Amino acid sequence: MSDSGKVGAVLVVGGGIGGVQTALDLGDSGYKVYLVERASAIGGVMAMLDKTFPTNDCSMCILSPKLVAAGRHENIELMTQTEVLGVSGEPGNLKVRLKRYARSVDLAKCTGCGDCLTKCPVRDLPNEFEGGLSKRRAIYRMYAQAVPNAPTIDRTQCLKFTRDKCGACQKSCKAGAIDYTQQDEEIEVEVGSIVVAAGSKIAPTGLRPEYGHGRYPNVVTSLEYERILSASGPYSGHVKRPSDGKEPKRIAWLQCVGSRDDSVERGYCSAMCCMYAVKEAVITKEHAKHVEPAVFYMDMRSYGKDFDKYVERAEQQYGVRLVRARVAEVREDPETKNLVLRFAGDGGQRSQEFDMVVLSCGFVPPPELIELSKRLDFELDKYGFAATDQWGPIATTRDGVSVAGSFAQPMAIPEAVTGASGAAAAAEEVLAAERGKLAAVKEVPAETDVRGEAPRIGVFVCHCGINIGGVVRVPEVTEYARSLPHVVFAEENLYSCSGDTQEKIKDRIREHRLNRVVVASCSPRTHEPLFQATVTEAGLNPHLFAMTNIRDQCSWVHMKEPDKATEKSKDLVKMAVARALRLKPLPKVKLPVTKAGLVVGGGVAGMTSALALAGEGFDVFLVEQEKTLGGNARTIATTVEGDDVKARLEELVGKVTSHPRIKVYSGARIKAIDGFVGNFQTTLQREERGERREESLKHGAVVVATGAQYRTPTEYGYGQSDRVLSQKELEEILSGSRQSPVAIRQSQSIVMIQCVGSRDEERPYCSRICCAEAVKNGLKVKEVNPDADIYVLYRDIRTYGLREEYYRQARQKGVVFIRYSPEQKPEVRIEDGKPLVSVFDPILGQPVELSPDLLVLSSGLVPQAGSDELAKMLKVPLNADGFFLEAHMKLRPVDFATEGVFMAGLCHFPKFIDEAAAQAKAAAGRAATILSRDTLEAEATVASVNPDRCSACHMCEGLCAYRAIEVKTINERTGKQAAVVNEALCKGCGACAANCRSLAIDIRGFQAENISREIAALLD
Amino acid sequence: MASYEPKIVGFLCNWCTYAGADLAGTSRMQYPPNMRPIRVMCSSAVDSVYILRALLEGADGVFIGGCHPGDCHYVSGNYKARRRMVLFNSVMKSLGLDTDRVWLRWISAAEGRKFADTITEMTGHLSKKGPSAFKEKWEV
């Protein structure tokens, strides 16, 4: 605890992607984190998914590095099988009581070898992670890549606990990690802030018993289907149906199971099911070409960035059939186990047979969280999600407790990750003065200078219990290693990764004056950092270490060929030794950090971001090109939820302009941005007293929040009659800031047309906010004039998430929604200055003629003017639609690929105020991971150029995805030019090196020489 | 000929194929022990010189594994590898050399099965084809 009485630690509840991201951001920003998870491993729902939309990235591949990073982060304490009992104290200083349930496996001893997993005689338990589609034992690992990788014992099933017999797992464990005597324990931790990222669950299928899940084996939930698709799932990624293991030909997805359904008190839309169903259908086609997928839906809610394009591809390239119908019932043919769907379609009641049915279950807050909310004393909304405020979508009703992820409301992964970084920022604002107080300080001994010494290589060969030693003859491999040139020491270990072996390796380095170390064991992807840390502790540069994988890629995959596996292990050791021979100590490149942030754009997102950064304790420059702050929000009166935007905006502007750490530059333009992460320099231009002035700002990070623009319609008679308005103009009329051509009170009918200039060839994206805006303004008109007839002509109503409620209200109040298809768009004529609208009504099956007093066009948002210019200055990309493109659609939603640059708000894509505010906070949270440091350490394994060889051909420049290499004049006198690597930006991929025609570029640690030697050693 | 065992040098990208090979291991999927993996950060880092070097030193085949198109950890490295491979093959062809001894495949971190199958298939293919004459032919 510090002088302020606050504690520089944060408790994060929930180890899904949300909680993990919050923990990583906080840990990276200098806070101690307790990451509490009820299950035996972190990963949450995302770990169960096969692929993710809209990029079809493999879910585990992108998640697993984050899990591993959280698992070994020096500031993160992972507390699995733990739950919160209660909390006391004030924000800044909270005491949290926790209960840790016994795992019966000692995490400090377990090496994750998995020997115990095959010995347990209790083998018929349903594997919950696999949706019960496969079996697990009483001792089990949640999933193959689980973090921590140690198994847990299910005490309700284990014979040791139920009958006091067996003990097979203990006998099989050579590490002595099985501990039946472990007890559940209560622990108390002190923290300054709490983030709840408890996630959501898929809606119970019992909400729709008529769909037969649980009764019919071939009806599965969407999450079970994810496991079926997964290469590491119960069917190894083969599309099979559970009843007979046959490949299904016809698969149906039924949308809105437990969503948009008032009859089961789930009135909201679950926001992501349309997309995941289409994705599952697409992936199915990739796995099994002959399958005919069909998705039965109400509205296709593909409202996100690049989502509409994805759905279009699904239909046109993959042949996914989209059927607009709600299925009434599913019946099984008892003979074939096929399923017959009954639904209302074109031409009345129809039925269709399928081989398999997937229920697109919505999301519900985990019911056990009602208890958690009581223990932490914050309120829930009527559905059981955490109650939050629109402008602070991260704060719960209790001070010091924030919420991240889908426990706030149903949301997809990017929004969860965004909320997570935002929650980190919120915690940092409370604890700005406590940064670094409880962060781990690593003490590293001085590095031994090995330059000029002959190589003295030590080789450690691992048995990994019997995992390697049971197949490969480890003593023989060790003996062989000893015979290799420059190897002065070799020995075998039972478990190379165990704590005592680490000590032993350090001793051997000192005793034998080793200056290169080779470990032959498991995968460097998981264990290289551990061994590198060990050699560092013994005074060696971490890059004097080489690892080779004789387990995952040898003993485990050649279990029946011990001779050949032993030969392969020898080869692998020989190759590693050859590589080690030429390893060089790599310098740590340290770069100073300017602890200030630049925020570009003074709308809601920009201001929120600026406030969060300032709250975290950093100086902020806020640049706005207009004379006043506020951006698009200035034209909005209220949100659909009824929030007074004007009042909120005033409050926000007041806070920003009075904050001592924020300097506002309004009416300013950015002329140039130079530099790189930690060290940017921006030149501003602005008029002051009629004089053009330039100013230079130094900062370590950038947040782009330049917004978007309302599009002015050009179609449907806009401009030809004053009775044709844009939705924004109607909003202004309703808020009293614009005169209406016909008083709303006297209007008999109003027609709104949706998707005007959106979702077409020119702008193939959905503007996301227009449906809710139309609903909002429709409701407002009804308030003023309940007798007005309001018609909304739409393609799909996309009031996703909790906004669905207002769509329902609008229908209840008599707003009429008429669907039109892009092939049969409404037609508008202007006669006598009045619009006449004709549209084909698919329910009546005939055209309808309307002559409204007002025609309102929802014409969407377009990218901000000047985005491309800013993009060029920052060296960041725009997507095909002209919005800024994030580093990764799922897991880096507010980062750019260029380090130190972040984004928030409409410049990323159209979105609501709460979403923009969450993103703005997130950008501040991410920026803090950089600004909180005094220096940044650049990656050591980066490209380096031999200027004598470089011919300055510029080839490498175009190849570098990070713009990290550039040809410059390196000698002013001779004019000599050569490529120069910016080590702060280089990621070490090697594309430049492999393509360099002058052989001038090498990747440190992966030098061509090392790899060539490796090849030569193998084949000599 | 019965005792002929093809020697394959593998270049596996750290983020996808190497991880996929690890998963094949954790899932205990068996495949022939003929490939010797070398971990590289990205398939784009596999210099054509490495491939030639391996063939000249007597490898019967070279395997390169990268992330699926669109999945590259380094944005577009796999596309660069693919482009280079096309070029490499055309050079091999114009020299009158086999192009089916060098395989470039996309294997993700979740595709342990695909990794095992691919290595099995490649080993089978090279076994049928017989030893490479590259080394003898080009030995100077």
Image (cartoon, rainbow, N blue to C red):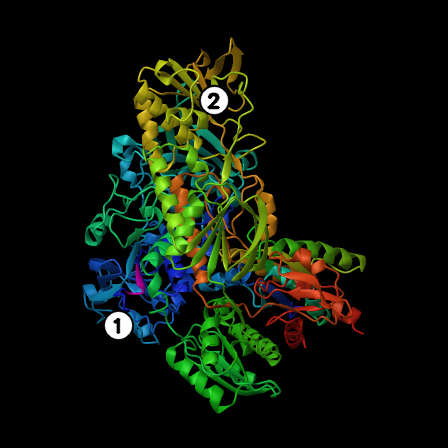
Q: Amino acid at mark 2?
A: Leu
Q: Quadrant of residue B94?
A: bottom right
Q: Which quarter shows the N terminus of chain A?
A: bottom left
Q: Is residue A185 visible?
A: yes
* Marks 2 and 1 belong to one chain: yes
Magenta-highlighted stretch: main secondary structure? strand
Residue under label 2, please give it. Answer: A725
Q: Residue A595's mark?
A: none
**Residue A373 drawn at (x, y percent):** 22, 50
**Residue A776 drawn at (x, y percent):** 36, 28
Earlier along the polypeptide chain: callout 2 or callout 1? 1
Q: Is residue B91 above or below residue A471?
A: above
Residue depicted at x 71% and y 54%: B86
Secondary structure of the residue carrying tag 2 is strand
Foreground: B4 or B121? B121
Residue under label 1, please give it. Answer: A179
Mark 2–mark 1 Cα distance, whole angstroms, equals 73 Å
Residue depicted at x 34% and y 64%: A433
Q: Is residue A839 above or below residue A587?
A: above
**Residue A447 drawn at (x, y percent):** 51, 83
Residue extent of the magenta highlight: A7-11
**Residue A723 drawn at (x, y percent):** 47, 17
Foreground: A555 or A1010? A1010
| Residue that sits furthest to the bottom in the current view | A511
Q: Quadrant of residue B58?
A: bottom right
Secondary structure of the residue carrying tag 1 is loop
Q: Is residue B75 magenta?
A: no
Foreground: A337 or A972? A972
